[in-house]
Image (cartoon, rainbow, N blue to C red):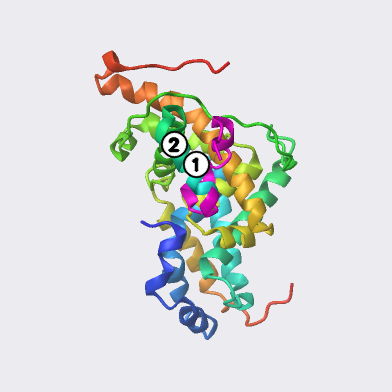
């Protein structure tokens, strides 16, 4: 089946995740071979997701770990967590 | 540092948890160490400021400690922990309602046309651009600026790298819903970010002459 660009856009996320049905995948691939716009949309989306996933985007503030573990220490020096907490 | 999904393979977390419950409470420090960034990132994406996000992250870890006995090992510890974080962040937002502009009402999953940004070519942007603070900021703001429903799914799936089933479990929705929301969220990100990233990185790459630019879709 020949797909229009707009229909290909609906499959971009599934294409990236590898979750498309074989038939749909084949149609999308065929479209991508000759459509530079959809190819660029796919490439840019993939590229953006790689950048967003980089550890540097959501960095821990300075001293975060120290503050967290010292707060945990206060809690941990108390009682052990109960086996089966109610509620 | 790793994303949530990558950490658990090499450690026996179920055993660590049993030891903690048995009284070796100091092991909790080691148990959670790989997840500090993930929990903080999740909180930050909701709270939008570092101080509140740090506080929510601490609360989530404390809550995880207190509730550790109710961890059943049916899901991974990381999935369980991120569920606690999500609930803590949502709860905090709810309490802050009134002094924040963000609506916590969930938009519906109604399908509407979401179109990507249109471009004719895409020059791969390498991860090195993340050395630039303004690019890190741009990406963070784009994720934080998504409607809550879509932000959650991007954080879980694309930042924390949970699989579709795990993301569905955390959000208490079906795998199909995860896929639909994820698709919309990713297209929204592409639409927001592609033009900015392209122009910001084109400046440094001295490739301006061959730039073919953007065009309007009509």
Name which quarter of the figure residue B48 lies in: top right
At x 47%, y 55%, the residue is: B161
User: A52 or A77: nearer the eye?
Assistant: A52
Badge 2: chain ID = A
Label 2 close to label 1 by CB (< 8 Å) = yes
Q: Could you say where residue B119 lies in the image, as x and y percent from the top left?
A: 44, 24
- Chain of residue at mark 1: A
Q: Residue furthest top?
A: B209
**Which numbered disc covers residue A32?**
2
Tag 2 secondary structure: helix
Give above or below for B73 relative to B35.
below
Picture quadrant of residue B203: top left
Which residue in the structure is indicated by mark 1?
A: A28
- Say which of A62 and B176 sits in front: B176
Q: How many residues crowd around disc 1 within 10 Å: few (fewer than 14), some, or many (20 or more)?
A: many
| Magenta-drawn segment | A1-23
Residue pictured at 38% horizontal, 21% vertical? B199
Left or right of A85, for residue B53: left
Q: Residue at x 67, y 81 (%)?
A: A84
How far from the left and from the top, in percent, is residue A78?
Answer: 56, 75
Residue at far left of view: B206
């Amino acid at each position: 089946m020949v797909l229009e660009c707009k229909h290909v856009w609906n499959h971009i996320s599934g294409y990236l995740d590898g979750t498309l049905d074989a038939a749909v995948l084949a149609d999308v691939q065929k479209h991508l071979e000759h459509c530079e716009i959809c190819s660029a949309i796919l490439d840019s989306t993939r590229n953006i997701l790689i950048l967003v996933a980089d550890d540097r985007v959501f960095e821990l503030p300075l001293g975060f770990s120290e503050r967290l573990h010292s707060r945990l220490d206060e809690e941990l020096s108390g009682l052990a967590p109960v086996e089966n907490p109610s509620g | 540092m790793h994303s949530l999904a990558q950490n658990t393979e090499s450690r026996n977390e179920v055993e660590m948890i049993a030891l903690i419950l048995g009284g070796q409470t100091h092991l909790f420090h080691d148990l959670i160490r790989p997840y500090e960034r993930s929990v903080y990132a999740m909180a930050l994406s909701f709270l939008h400021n570092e101080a509140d996000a740090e506080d929510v992250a601490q609360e989530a870890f404390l809550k995880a400690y207190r509730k550790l006995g109710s961890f059943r090992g049916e899901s991974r510890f990381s999935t369980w922990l991120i569920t606690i974080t999500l609930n803590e962040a949502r709860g905090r937002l709810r309490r802050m309602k009134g002094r924040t502009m963000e609506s916590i009402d969930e938009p519906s999953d109604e399908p509407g046309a979401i179109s990507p940004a249109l471009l004719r070519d895409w020059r791969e942007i390498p991860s090195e651009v993340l050395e630039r603070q303004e690019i890190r900021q741009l990406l963070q703001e784009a994720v934080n600026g998504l409607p809550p429903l879509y932000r959650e799914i991007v954080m879980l799936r694309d930042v924390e790298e949970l699989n579709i089933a795990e993301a569905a479990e955390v959000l208490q929705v079906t795998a199909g819903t995860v896929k639909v929301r994820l698709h919309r969220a990713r297209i929204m990100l592409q639409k927001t970010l592609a033009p900015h990233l392209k122009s910001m990185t084109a400046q440094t790459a001295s490739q301006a002459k061959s730039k073919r630019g953007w065009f309007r879709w009509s």
